[in-house]
Image (cartoon, helix red, strand yellow):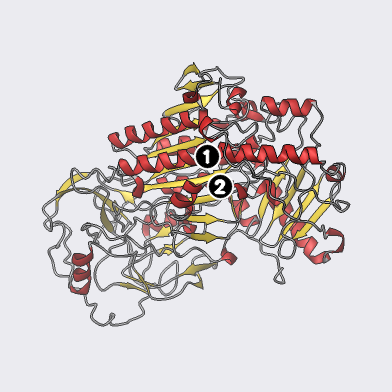
Amino acid sequence: MMQKKSRLAPLLSVLVVLSTQLIPGSTATSAKPLLQTGPSRLFPETGKSVGGVFLDYWNTHGGLPQQGYPISGEMQEKSDTDGKMYTVQYFERAVFELHPENAAPNNVLLSLLGNFRYKQKYPNGAPGQTMNNSAGSMLFPQTGKRVGGLFLQYWKANGGLAQQGYPISEEFQEKSDLDGKTYTVQYFERAVFEMHPENKPPYNVLLSQLGTFRYRDRYSAGDGSTQSSGKPNIVFILTDDLDASEVAYMPKLKSLLVDQGTTFSNFFVTDSLCCPSRSSIQRGQYVHNHGVLGNSPPTGGFQTFFARGNQDSTVGTWLKSAGYRTALMGKYLNGYPQTAAENYVPPGWDEWDSPTDNQAYGEYNYKLNENGTVKLYGSSPQDYLTDVISGKAANFIQQAAGANTPFFMYLATYAPHQPATPAPRHANLFPDAKAPRTPDFNEQDVSDKPQFIQNLPLMTQSVIDTTDALYRKRLQSLQAVDDLIGNVVDTLKAQGKLDSTYIVFTSDNGFHLGQKRMPAGKQTAYDTDIRVPMIVRGPGVPAGRTSDLLTMEVDFAPTFAQLAGAAAPDFVDGRSLVPLLSNNPPQASSWRQGALIEHYAGSDEPFQSDFELQQQKKGSRTTIPTYQAVRTQNYTYVEYTTGERELYDLRSDPYELQNIYKSADPELLKQLASMLDGLRKCSGANCRIADSVALSGGK
């Protein structure tokens, strides 16, 4: 449920009830009143009945499509508390304010004032908390309500409420008398809202006190620390082929993001291959739904993404439509811009700086499409691609800050992808580093593994030395990414935007380096390849915390959409992670229970850089068959089209050494196969149903 703690700040405006009701989209200020007597049509104990077109809309659409309906344009109003001018807008069916030091969803402050309590714990009001509702607002002269009692004292002393109402119960299950379904409910004081399960936050907030409310979405004139819309900025940093263990060599990542944000320790990609995974990030869909099955045509690459029209509806187009200034800098999709013009810029991006050839993997001598103009970069130190992206990112932040416009910036480095070319200043670092010698490194007995693993010989010392050399280069190349993180944070801070910006760091897939005898690569369903780092820093995000809930790259698009107040299309398969970015995340039992992993075999994947093409010609890679898998908290279960199966109990075997498929409980196998079958065929909201089915018997 929504229990948001707001950071203290200067005095905010007050929202109070007027008494009108409007048809959605109407701009009038009066209409047929809502019924507000008798038992609730939604929950039996609310003491309010919902009627009129509000109930009609609820029954038709399964909830409100947004947090209230605007019934006026923005207008200037002088506060009689501090004498400053604020921008105010009138809304129907919404009670919320935007806090300047926080960003959505933690900037939402419910401030319905008075002695009205939703399922109140104290029938006569909590001791000392009596509200004076006599006429005359203490904040804005037109509200028609006065704020009194301890509420006003707290308001004056602290500059607003510290949270969205005060919880006076734990979450519990209650059956709705509207549809007979069971919903999660929590009692709050001074907050009136219900959660609707068929919509994603914040669109599942149904305010039960109906009428017209106002909110303020801008702050005192001349305050450059907040942008005009009150919306947060979002910076998304996407690396290429990053192994989860390698973040230990990125000190700025640790001090600026890990220590200041939340780490998601069970974050997985749905396909451990570049282009399918990046397509999932752009669209919030599983591979079987966005249709980009690999890195190359006829069923993969940018060519397939483009031919299917996927570029017409992405996280970029959604946020641009929501008023964001958008930028993509770095790697887009494998094969870009083949089948389109060399200077092609996809819809949704105000700033576009993406390489148009495979030379970018080497960080030098690449061509960069800069907003429709293709520029050739050379081999000088200043041409090093990660640094070029970093510089462009800083410029974009400065420009967006000057325009006082919320921005979404997608930064996609090629590092540490092979050949993992480091910047000259980092070329001699980590001389003694070696690939981690985990228990599955150069695994001796692979007789229980699929044939493609059994076909691999034990790594020779020469192969191990080559693997270690690549590992050192990867660590070296990551230092420029670490510098990019530092540059982004420093620039945001200098522009007064750091506290209103979410920064998200991750990778498109993991990487193996010697595990299961595999020298270097990805694409498997083993944790080395599907588990990737994911860290979020931002307004209201708990610092230094780790979440082990199952999360995926299909969740990025709906998360960014919700943070930006944008509408995500119905085709989205993933879940918004916004509920996980607070001090009160959902319980594991009410979250995703299984992550879908899928991979489609291809003739030349992932051989997209010149280096990998050479490896393919040498025949140094093994073919991985098509498979689908499900990753739960405790198990990895894999079905290959060859008929082979794998099952690992990750509690006792975190390195996936012992395939227990042949000895496993038949009931467990049945449940895992059923979960996988539901996920491999799902689409849209059905995916969030299929992934929520828990294994029975405590498995």
Q: Secondary structure at mark 2?
A: helix
Q: Is residue 290 visible?
A: no
Q: Residues within 10 Å of mark 1 (few under 14, many from 20)?
A: many
> Which residue corresponds to mark 1?
479
Rendering coords of residue 128 (x, y %):
23, 80
Identify residue type, mark 1.
Gln
In terms of depth relative to the viewer, which is nearer, 180 or 481? 481
Q: CA distance from mark 2 to mark 1?
A: 8 Å
Q: Looking at the image, which residue is at 29% across and 59% down? A: 211
Q: Looking at the image, which residue is at 30% across and 65% down? A: 162
Rendering coords of residue 345 (x, y %):
49, 24
Left or right, 172 with reference to 232: right
Q: Are marks 2 and 1 in contact (CB under 8 Å)?
A: yes
Rendering coords of residue 429 (x, y %):
57, 39
Rendering coords of residue 474 (x, y %):
61, 38
> Which residue corresponds to mark 2?
249
Would you identify the image quadrant in which residue 96 lies? Answer: bottom left
Q: Looking at the image, which residue is at 72% across and 72% down? A: 697
Q: Looking at the image, which residue is at 78% across and 41% down? A: 626
Name the quadrant of the C terminus: bottom right
Identify residue type, mark 2.
Tyr
Name the quadrant of the N terminus: bottom left
Would you identify the image quadrant in which residue 491 lies? Answer: top left
In terms of depth relative to the viewer, which is nearer, 509 or 482? 482
Would you identify the image quadrant in which residue 633 lies? Answer: bottom right
Q: Earlier in the sequence, mark 2 or mark 1?
A: 2
Q: Residues within 10 Å of mark 2 (few under 14, many from 20)?
A: some
| In the image, residue 407 above or below residue 663 | above
Left or right, 206 with reference to 239: left
In terms of depth relative to the viewer, which is nearer, 34 or 549? 549
Left or right, 502 with reference to 677: left
Q: Secondary structure at mark 1?
A: helix
